[in-house]
Amino acid sequence: MTELSRSAPQVSPKLGWLTSQTQLVLLVTLFALCLLISLAAPQFYSVDNIIAILRQSSLVLIVAVGMTMLLIAAEVDLSVGASLAFAGVVAMDVTNKTSSVTLGVMAGILFGGGVGLINGLIVTKLRINSLIATIAMMMMLQGSVYLYSREAVQNKHLQPLFTWLSTGYVGPLPLPVVVTAVLFAIGYVVLRHTTLGRYVYAVGANEKAARLSGIRPARIKMLVFIVTGLLTGLVGVILCSLMNAGQPTAGRGFELTVVAAVILGGTSLTGGRGTLLGTLLGVLILKVIDNGIIILRWDQDLQMVIPGFIIVIASYLDLLRKKSNAS
Amino acid sequence: MPQSLEARVDRVAPIPRLAAMFRRNETVLLLVLVALLVFFTIGSPTFMTTRNITNVLGQASIAMIAAVGLGMLVIAGEIDVSIGSLVGAVALPLVVIMNATGSLELGIISALVFALAIGAVNGYLSAYLGINSLIVTLGSMFVIRGGIYIYTGQKAIPDDLALESFYQIGNGRLLGMIPYPALVALAVFAVFSYMMGHRRFGRQLYAVGGDAEVARLAGYNVRQSKFIAFVLCSLFAGVSGILLSSRLGSAVHVSGLGFEFQVVAAVVLGGVSLAGGIGSLGGVALGVLILAFLSNGLGMLNLATEWQQVITGLIIIGAVGLDELRRRRG
């Protein structure tokens, strides 16, 4: 069973040298980018700008925490963009109808969780490839959000509490950044220091071996789909609060940004390998580039082109490192 | 390895052993298609008219051409999600060169060369450098779409000369009946369906997608086969893009957005496994037709386009789920 022995070291969450080196490369890249941009545009290092970068990173990072776990478990969810738009619409609508921000927020998060649950059921019970299952889910959500509401749902009661969700501050930091930090820390501890986290790696590295050692892969995968769904719902709510309206068209292409950041962070598409620290660096690199393009007044459409090159180069470097490591 | 090489070779050898299953899969899809046609004929008086049917075939053929290319690539065990961006991008060299030279032929040639170049890059990075093709083509999807936006400044580039021949390739009909795109699709489908089913070309792609190592030991050039599949996939997406641009009458910067999802859906609905090595172009063609008639028929029943998306999603999950169940039993 060469298959098993080859993937056995990957099951361990302590990936040691190999991954720490991936992260080192990412960290150096991040610093180099910051340095280059700040040389060209000194205002890069203003407090306002750094907070803006963190605020933009936080939305992507929340979903990326779930997506990292999904990719480690050898699954993927492309419906997150469509789901977060719908969750925002639901959150705004429930808030308007009940005048309760709490209920609205809950509804949005639970909506996302529900989508995650259905995705998980389709993938584990019907055993449909998650790429195609979540593309189908994306189509259904994009269609049905318009059936639910033809236009953006506005914040009718002008509830300041709802706007505070995205614009509020805890001390010097914006609320979304604080929420993201907390969620990231929880995800980091669970994935790296608990049995559950180890199971996620085991299921993704070798599902058969995991089953033979007494893990139930379907349950682990269900759980990760639901977690990703709940996090997506939360981001839907925050984005809705930021725009002060539930937009059915919000989040188009969001899924690709998240997947790009996770892959850039060194998580393998074939499962079993990846870390949340890598994902954090991946998100920050992409958002610093976005920010740099704006600050340097370059053509904003470069925000699509440059990450495209970066994903491919990053995975090629990763491949080279794996090869030199194997020989 | 638990299985002997012979056992694995036996499992991979696709055509004779799995033939019965393919036939069954295609029969199911055909029945679904016939059921849809009957249902819509009863539901709407204008559905089963020559005009409407040829209309749908004209629309379906643009997806069909790209789906033949993607189907072969997925059978070879790889994927290309950049075809939507490519469909939009080939319109730029086409319209720009046509406007500059006044020659449709030069425009088409430069569009096809552009598509070939993209396919060669995708193929080189995936097949020769060994980077996961989903990542590579996700990257080129971003790069190409961003490139279109930068070049056009997010505006459509009109066909300044309003060439009659340019209008005709996408909108014209042979004998006033059969749309030209449908003829192109039929030709592409017939040639490559034959190649996949009966020639070394097809056996090679099935073998490479089924088990690359066994294919290598059997003497096939794995990298080259995959590279060729990438180039053909991009080339066919380029042809789709040219026809679409003729229908739109210009190079539209947002054209082809989401097209890759439609085509992937049709290919998978047609019974091609994303794991590679399994499926047939006949199934792919039925998958395209089912989705095209579904969207047209639901429109005729005055159902909102949003419902069409929801129902399409449900049908994909239903069909792929059933197929998966049958495979596990069988």
Image (tube, coloured by chain):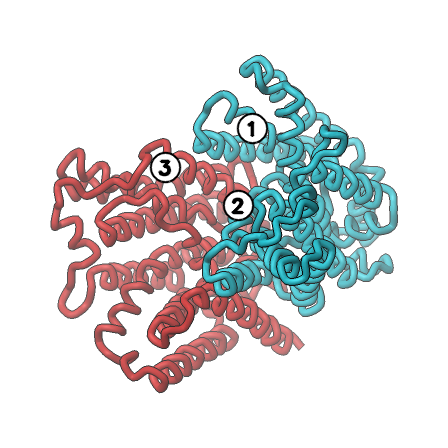
Chain colours: A red, B cyan
Q: Are marks 1 and 2 in contact (CB under 8 Å)?
A: no
Q: Are marks 2 and 3 in contact (CB under 8 Å)?
A: no
Residue holding disc 2: A130
Q: CA distance from mark 3 to mark 1?
A: 21 Å
Q: Earlier in the sequence, mark 2 or mark 3?
A: 2
Q: Which mark is residue B296?
A: 1
Question: Please, is residue B277 above or below residue B288 in the view?
Answer: below
Q: Quadrant of the C terminus of chain A?
A: bottom right
Residue holding disc 3: A145
Q: Going 46% across and 49% down the picture, which residue do you hit?
A: A77
- In this orientation, which residue lies closer to the viewer: B189 or B131? B189
Element type at mark 3 = helix
Tell me the kind of residue under disc 3: Val
Question: Please, is residue B35 above or below residue A67 in the view?
Answer: above
Tell me the kind of residue under disc 1: Asn
Q: Residue under mark 3: which chain is it in?
A: A
Q: Position of residue B137 (x, y in %)?
A: 59, 59
- Judge from the rendering whether residue A102 lies leftward or rightward of residue A284; answer left or right: left
Q: Quadrant of the N terminus of chain A?
A: bottom right
Q: Position of residue B201 (x, y in %)?
A: 84, 51
Element type at mark 1 = helix
Q: Are marks 3 and 1 in contact (CB under 8 Å)?
A: no
